[in-house]
Image (cartoon, helix red, strand yellow):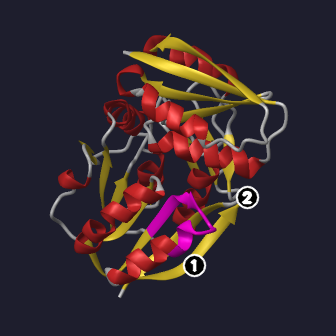
Amino acid sequence: MQYLQITFSFETIEDYQQDLLIADLSDIGFNTFEDTENGFSAYIDQASFEEEAFQAVIKEIDETLSYSYSSQEIAAENWNEEWEKNFEPLIVSNACYVRATFHQPRPEFPFEIIIDPKMAFGTGHHRTTTMMMEYILEADLNGKVVLDMGCGTGILAILAAKKNAAKLTAIDYDEVCYASTIENTLLNNIQGMEILCGGKEVIPAVKYDTILANINRNILLDQIPVYAEVLKNGGDIYFSGFYEETDLKMITDACALSGILYNSHKKIDNWVAAHFKKA
């Protein structure tokens, strides 16, 4: 499988401006992002790339920004070499240590997760994933039935398993993410996780105590009614992948229509993770 790497360089750019561009690229299929010295690189499966959609995103870039971009094809087998150059271990809430296979273990932390991204989103380094992990670390998942939608590398489901969730389902529409989650559950000795490839249509008809969904605003808005159907009364749902301004209210209003009520939210820069409960 071939991937397309598009690297953006800016003379100057504010964090929120870069985040907005990354969000727009996510909406058209880009699923991995890597900071560079003067900007960032975005990655997409070559078969999923649509030039017209990409150019529409480019037209929306703030006209005050001075930037350039370049693109190159990358074979999947070369991805590991790329991310290994830049992947650094991560500590979340001083409780969870996230590392790759080539890093040394840190047994002093209560939780350790080994992640091999393989072009899939989710190493914990992005603000949204970090905040979702913080919520999981704070939550009581002992014996709970948990759904992870848009699982990426499986990192959130893996952490939920380490928090003693009784039954786990992880779903992603991207075949690379699906394969990555399978591999990462094996790396972390997680047994019995149900891993599915697809969207809302493959969500099993069971009742969940907790739902995790770190995707993006538009997909969340589309899928909230389905989440409401499978979430138990009194159950918890954690969302991320969107911004505080405008987006949080849209998510809150959509949830309220389905009987899911706002509880709290976290914020890093303008990115948000939010906790809701079903009435």
Locate residue 260: give its quadrant.
bottom left
Disc 2 to disc 1, C-alpha distance: 17 Å
Q: Which residue corresponds to the image point at 52% horizontal and 31% vertical from the top-left?
A: 55
Tell me, yes or no, if residue 126 can be seen here: no
The residue mark sitting in front, 2 or 1, is 2
Q: Is residue 161 left or right of residue 274?
A: left
- Magenta stretch? 238-249
Locate residue 183: give its quadrant.
top left
Q: Which residue corresponds to the image point at 80% horizontal and 41% vertical from the top-left?
A: 13
Tell me, yes or no, if residue 88 can be seen here: yes
Image coords of residue 119 (percent x, y): 48, 28
Q: Residues within 10 Å of mark 2 (few under 14, many from 20)?
A: few
190 above or below 206? above
Q: Which residue corresponds to the image point at 59% horizontal and 38% vertical from the top-left?
A: 59
Q: Nearer the viewer, residue 95 or 250?
A: 250
Image coords of residue 169 (percent x, y): 29, 53
162 above or below 53? below
For badge 1, the amino acid type reads Ser
Q: Nearer the viewer, residue 264 or 105?
A: 264
Residue 264: numbered disc:
1
Helix, strand or loop under label 2: loop
For the N terminus, give its image quadrant: top left
Q: Kindly give the residue lying farthest to the right in the view shown.
A: 12
For badge 2, the amino acid type reads Asp
Q: Of label 2 and label 1, which has the lower sequence position?
A: 1
Residue at image mark 2: 269
Residue 172: numbered disc:
none
